[in-house]
Image (spheres, grey):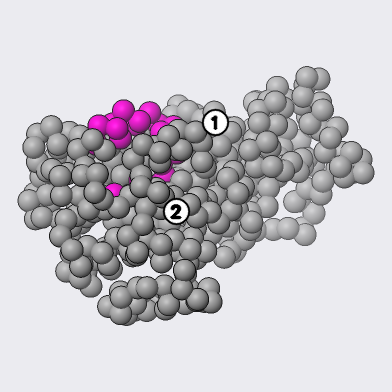
Amino acid sequence: MPNNPQGSFYGLGIAPGLLQALDALKFTVPTPIQHKAIPIAIEGKDIIGIAQTGTGKTLAFGIPMIQQLAQKKGKGLVLAPTRELALQINEALGKLLLTFRMRSAVIIGGESMHHQVQALRNTPRILIATPGRLLDHLEHRNTRLDDVAILVLDEADRMLDMGFAPQIDQILRLIPKDRQTMLFSATMPASIVKIAAAHMRLPVRTEIAPTGTTAERVSQELFVVSKEKKGQLLKELLKRYTASVLLFVRTKRGAQRVTRDLRAAGHPAAEIHANRSLSQRKEALAGFKSGKYRILVATDIAARGIDVTGIELVVNFDLPDDPENYVHRIGRTGRAGREGHAITFATPDQGKDVQGIEKIIRTSIPVAQHPTLPAERFSSSSQSHVQQQQRHRGGQQQRPSFGGTRHFGYPRRQRR
């Protein structure tokens, strides 16, 4: 790797035209994953990048891909697990693509096949796609993959979690073996190792944080609360945290109910889940970014599909079904060098589920108690969790964030 202090994109092997474009876009300091991955990828090597969400992975693969496509024939293909992530990748790469007069096309479900066919006829150099819709276009012979020179599997673990393994295998069989492959993932399960062994050529692994670790700038807090009191606790918390809030629930029906309750309480809120159309999800995300909606309620479909700088609080209203999704959820805050906070609700019978999360993140989550709600404990089968925490802290309860010493938030927005 070039001898380069991690304070500039210069010295990473990036072409002058791209450096000028990065300067114009005010990208001056590479993130750790960009600093490590870009020189390797520019050399044309296969790479496995392990990094949490919000670490700048899009430019880590986007810069080398654009630079190499400017020098040779063929196209790039980026596979992503969700529609939202595909759109955000396209947005992030769009201004850089203009520098080289390249086009991209986004191939995702929920949008018009006709419009996508028109985009494909414009000979895009980069396809950004979800696996299912890409296969639809391949079946209709609207595009082909025999000229793919660079393949990116973004959020690969998430794609496998969502059941896309058969589609990915089908797509990989249609791409030339003589290609560069870049795989990015927050975790490194056995399924990812299997893909690397079968479809990558001596990949270089680069990791900026141990698998499963949570963002360094995100403080965490756990409330043990009965299911019936969750809504009341949430309303009390929202009196203290006046900034933007991303709130995760487990089910689509739960998202609808919580959003309805928040609106009834006077909070501007929107929802993102699988029952919402793509246009509704776009509007919700755009409204959240602009401040129209202070609270965005989401299921895990959005755990890695939301790239919004400035989210100060993540609330896990429900625990995730998969403990690893906890990492992806709270990774939505504490981005771009800012601090963030994550609050998790667990019912008294979920002590073992919390222990599963703590095993993944390799630390205990401090337990807090709200002064206006009755104290709750994990059930007897889960008491070891609380007892271990109390022994670790000398029998003292972790300081809750209601004494005025920790208060995230800026002045309360005007209601719209």
> Which stretch appears magenta?
151-171
Whole-number angstrom distance, CA of label 2 to CA of label 1:
28 Å
Reading the image, the residue beneath label 1 is 322
Q: Is residue 31 left or right of residue 164?
A: right
In this rendering, does residue 376 appear at all? Answer: yes
Determine the image quadrant of residue 57.
bottom left
Q: Which mark is residue 81?
A: none
Reading the image, the residue beneath label 2 is 204
Q: Is disc 1 placed on a helix, strand or loop?
A: loop
Residue plotted at (19% across, 38% down) = 174
**Height in image: 347 above or below 366?**
above
Front position in the image: 210 or 193: 193
Residue plotted at (46% across, 73% down) = 2
**Height in image: 104 above or below 326?**
below
Image spot of residue 352 (x, y percent): 70, 26
Q: Mark 1: few, some, or many residues within 10 Å (few <14, many ≥20)? A: few
